[in-house]
Amino acid sequence: MYSILKQFQENNSDHRTFRPIVKELLIICIWISFGALTIWGADGFGLLSTTQQGQSYPSLQVDFPAVYNIWKQKQAVFVDARSAAHFRRGHIPGAINVPINRIVLYLKDLPTDKDIPLITYCGSITCPNAYQLMNVLLGHGYQNVRFFPRGLRGWLALGYPLETE
């Protein structure tokens, strides 16, 4: 790429046309880098991560039938890590929506008591958002956070109720 720029500079002595091209190339490179970090993630938990999140922390998972009993007895607050649009289409009844990509804006919706049990979930077992949200909430001082790895698809597969807005 440097040789192309150098050749262009030698062939075109007018620096007024060269500088905007370099500026645009720098902007494109920055956006490509930002996109790569979003997709693959700096910590290995990006959108296309193949890391098996749940296997490292089995005690932080909650699954069937325990998750249904916890919900039925209102022993925890369920936190949906999916987008607001997906949340409106359907979610576990009584859940709070905290999209992982907009967590700072939605933290105010969570209980102020950091000892209240929270269970994060997303769309399905292949979605890393519930695990990521659990880690973010633990980092914000919440003490009793677990994640439901099967997500909404697993919930619906067993015929459990759905709430829509």
Image (tube, rainbow, N blue to C red):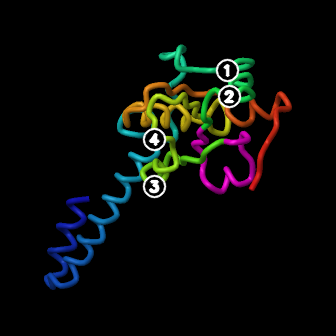
Disc 2 versus disc 1: nearer the observer: 1
Q: Earlier in the sequence, mark 2 or mark 4?
A: 4
Amino acid type, label 3: Leu
Q: Secondary structure at mark 2?
A: loop
Identify the residue position indicated by label 3 in the image: 105
Disc 1 versus disc 4: nearer the observer: 4
Q: Report whether 157 appears left or right of 96.
A: right
- Relative vertical location of residue 94 with respect to residue 83 in this rendering, above or below: above
Q: CA distance from mark 2 to mark 1?
A: 7 Å
- Relative vertical location of residue 16 with respect to residue 29 in this rendering, above or below: below
Residues tagged 2 and 1 counted as in contact (Cβ below 8 A): yes
- Estimate how packed mark 3 is, as few (under 14), some (14 to 19) or many (20 or more) residues with alpha carbons within 10 Å: few
Is residue 75 within the magenta segment?
Answer: no
- Relative vertical location of residue 25 with respect to residue 33 in this rendering, above or below: below
Is 2 in front, or is 35?
35
Disc 2 versus disc 3: nearer the observer: 3
Identify the residue position indicated by label 4 in the image: 112
Amino acid type, label 1: Asp
Is 72 in front, or is 6?
72
Amino acid type, label 4: Thr
Q: Which mark is on residue 63?
A: 1
Residues tagged 1 and 4 counted as in contact (Cβ below 8 A): no
- Estimate how packed mark 1 is, as few (under 14), some (14 to 19) or many (20 or more) residues with alpha carbons within 10 Å: some
- Image point (45%, 55%), residue name: 105
Disc 3 versus disc 4: nearer the observer: 4
Is 74 in front, or is 80?
74
